[in-house]
């Protein structure tokens, strides 16, 4: 096998293409939660990018799914979110933590961002931070 074939196989084997779905179907905002209706195939723990009417970006995570309705917890708070101008993009992915050996001895916030005034971490890999369910 020539080197270009090896490279081509390495590039395509780890990627799955999924469309990102964007919705403007907010039906309620309750505390840190946003309820979206008519969502196609929402998944538990899926990450949602939320864009407010003024262009501000926030992130959230699906906490509950009931049919075509999804309840999303917004990490940065819900102030300024309105049903008319805010849209939500479902990424199709769960929350992942970038990891590298450069992280050893460093301090991070709850989102995995360095807080010790050191250089940014260049990730060697990304690990899913969702725990496995407990087998009763």
Image: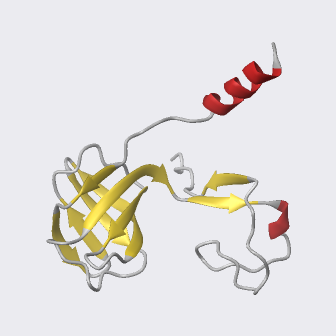
Tell me where residue 120 appears, x and y as whole percent.
73, 73
Q: Residue at x 73, y 59 (%)?
A: 123
Say which quadrant the N terminus sits in: top right
Q: Residue at x 75, y 87 (%)?
A: 117
Tell me where residue 47 appears, x and y as whole percent.
43, 58
Q: Quadrant of residue 88?
A: bottom left
Q: Quadrant of residue 30?
A: bottom left
Tell me where residue 119 appears, x and y as whole percent.
78, 77
Horizontally, residue 95 falls left or right of residue 65, namely right
Q: Quadrant of residue 116?
A: bottom right
- State the residue in front, 11 or 45: 11
Horizontally, residue 100 falls left or right of residue 10, namely right
Q: Residue at x 36, y 82 (%)?
A: 77
Total labels drawn: 0
- State the residue in front, 96 or 122: 122
Horizontally, residue 3 falls left or right of residue 13, namely right
């Amino acid at each position: 096998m020539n080197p270009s074939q090896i490279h081509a196989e390495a590039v395509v084997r780890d990627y799955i293409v999924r469309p990102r779905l964007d919705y403007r179907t907010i039906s309620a905002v309750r505390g840190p939660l946003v309820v979206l209706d008519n969502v196609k195939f929402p998944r538990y723990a899926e990450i949602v990018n939320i864009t407010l009417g003024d262009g501000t970006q926030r992130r959230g995570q699906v906490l509950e799914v009931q049919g075509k309705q999804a309840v999303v917890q917004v990490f940065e708070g819900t102030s300024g979110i309105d049903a008319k101008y805010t849209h939500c993009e479902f990424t199709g992915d769960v929350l992942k933590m970038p990891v590298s050996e450069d992280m050893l001895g460093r301090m991070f916030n709850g989102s995995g961002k360095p807080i010790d005034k050191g250089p940014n971490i260049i990730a060697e890999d990304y690990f899913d931070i969702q725990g496995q369910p407990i087998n009763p």
